[in-house]
Image (cartoon, rainbow, N blue to C red):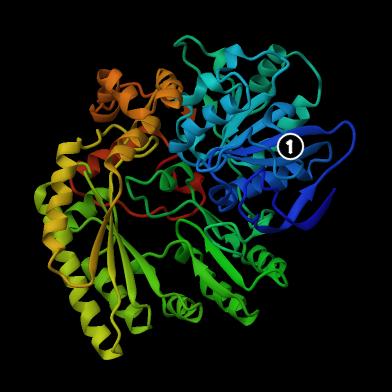
Amino acid sequence: MRKRRKPARDSGSKKIAPVEQGVIIKKGRGLIKAALAYPNTYTAGMSSLAFQTVYRIANQIPHVACERVFLPDPKEKGGQPKSIESGLTLDQFDVILFSISFENDFLHVVQLLDTAGIPMRSSDRTPLHPLVVAGGVACFLNPEPIAPFIDCFLLGEAECLLDHFFEKISHKSDKTALLQTLEKKLPGAYVPCLHPLKTPFQIQVQYLDNLDAVTTSTCILTSGTVFKDTFLIETLKGCPHGCRFCSAGFIYRPPRIYPVKNIYAAIDTASGKTDRIGLVSSAIADHPDITDICTYGQQHNFTLSFSSLRADKLTDELIDALTRSRVKTATIAPEAGSERMRNIINKKMTDHDILSATQRLVNAGIINLRLYFMIGLPFEQDQDIHAIVELTKKIKSVFLEVSKKKKKIGIITLSVNPFIPKPCTPFQWCAMADETVLKKRVRIIQQGVKKIANVTVNVASLRIAKIHALLSRGDRKTANLIESAAKQGWSSVIKQNSAYCHDIIYQEKPIDHPLPWDFLDNRVKKDFLAREFMRAKQEKKSPSCPMIDCKVCKTCI
């Protein structure tokens, strides 16, 4: 095995291939050839720490050669997708590992298989075809919409699964016996073909107990990502705050913190490769040593960036790190405009927190703000949407006052996204707001801010959000729609299956109603989610996870 710096293979693309540092090349007889497939573009896949982590772990296994495959650029005509490392096509591998972070990529899974000449459905494949395996957070939220396409899911964190998985498949046996062995002997393995009937079963999603011996950071540094030539380091898994719409705050409970020494070691690894460090987490500021981490990075001449920061957790040290990195746009996510609505979603952030963060950021020379809001939230009323407009006006007032003193004014951008009820959250029983309601909400915001100078509004596609909701909440029947959409496109498929889609997307479910993902045990009790849903109805906030031993707390697990 050797690592090297090389241009990424372009698979026939006319674009200049990005330069990569850290590519792993393995050659030799007897190796299991594994294609790690990201069902989206190179840029999206190489920006994913989860994808890079699987690549690193798989290649640390002596008898495995893991190579990367991505969705070809749709603007470019070409043949089959090929691996970056050797140019092999998907059908030439022993195993295909799909790393799926987002439900909208489910369609790309079947497109990649079809383009490679591999039957889409597991039942149509023979032992001559590669074993098709899938994992990633989208799968351990709800794997059912793509279950008919997948031979085996690996549900949970890669550190718990990959070594044991490759140990099992290294013992040659027929496919049926292998799949039975995987689900029987490998915790976290889910083989859909073994569960054709509605007989109860349960799969336990696998998690590391702690992160003491783990570092999650960039394996391959490349210019071809969203974070160009930035060395990414994860600082914390999960989020303690428990926003009721957010799956990361529940499926990763309890949040686990990387020891500061592990993060320092990762920063040291980046030395000589780049001068940019990106700290990644759903709750960056909740790491108890975040100030020391920033100081360490700056002392080693790195500029720092952060995946997300909460307005109520914005310290002087974090703002200083942003300023030193010459950041000109900061993001604040109020999610809702009214205190009432923020109580409902358990976003423990006040108007004062938001306005104070605005003042401090602009005063530090960060002249542009991006504000994230959701519309169509459970129990939302028109007054809550008008509150988004009023909060924007308050933010603009503070923004303008500080900007005048600095003699430079930037832009405030409102990013408005439809709420999608996600599995494994307290809102998993909710319906998505219909398109008529959402369009009305958008008009209220657009009309309310259109006369405010230096304020723009970006609204996420309502059509794509509807598809996202279907793929997030669907059952195995959704696979039929995915297969049809790969050939016909989503518009006609949704029209042809309007009653089914309406039931999945727009129908609220009773608390005792069975849900497609109920067979997954990801530690958080369903009755805890139900209690949180009732507290939302009552407009009550809940405390954040105390991040202590669950055997002591016993609140949700």
- Say which of 550 and 180 sits in front: 180
Quadrant of the image occupied by residue 422:
top left
* Residue 538 seen anywhere in this rendered image of the structure: yes
Q: To which quarter of the image does residue 161 belong? A: top right
Which residue is at 63% across, 55% downward? Answer: 216
Residue 522 in sight from this viewpoint: no
Q: Is residue 162 left or right of residue 375?
A: right
Quarter placement of the C terminus: top left
Q: Is residue 153 above or below residue 177?
A: below
- Where is residue 72 shown, x and y percent of the image? 57, 40
Give how far across and how far down residue 438 sits, in percent. 19, 43
Kind of residue indicated by mark 1: Asp
Q: Tell me where residue 182 appears, x and y as whole percent.
A: 67, 22
- Find residue 28 and report its horizontal and vertical position in percent: 89, 38
Q: Residue at x 63, y 73 (%)?
A: 275
Q: Which residue is mark 1?
A: 163
> Which of 341 and 324 lies nearest the eye of the viewer?
324
The answer to whether 31 is drawn above or below residue 114 in the figure is: below
Q: In the image, is 404 to the left or to the right of 236?
A: left
Q: Secondary structure at mark 1?
A: helix
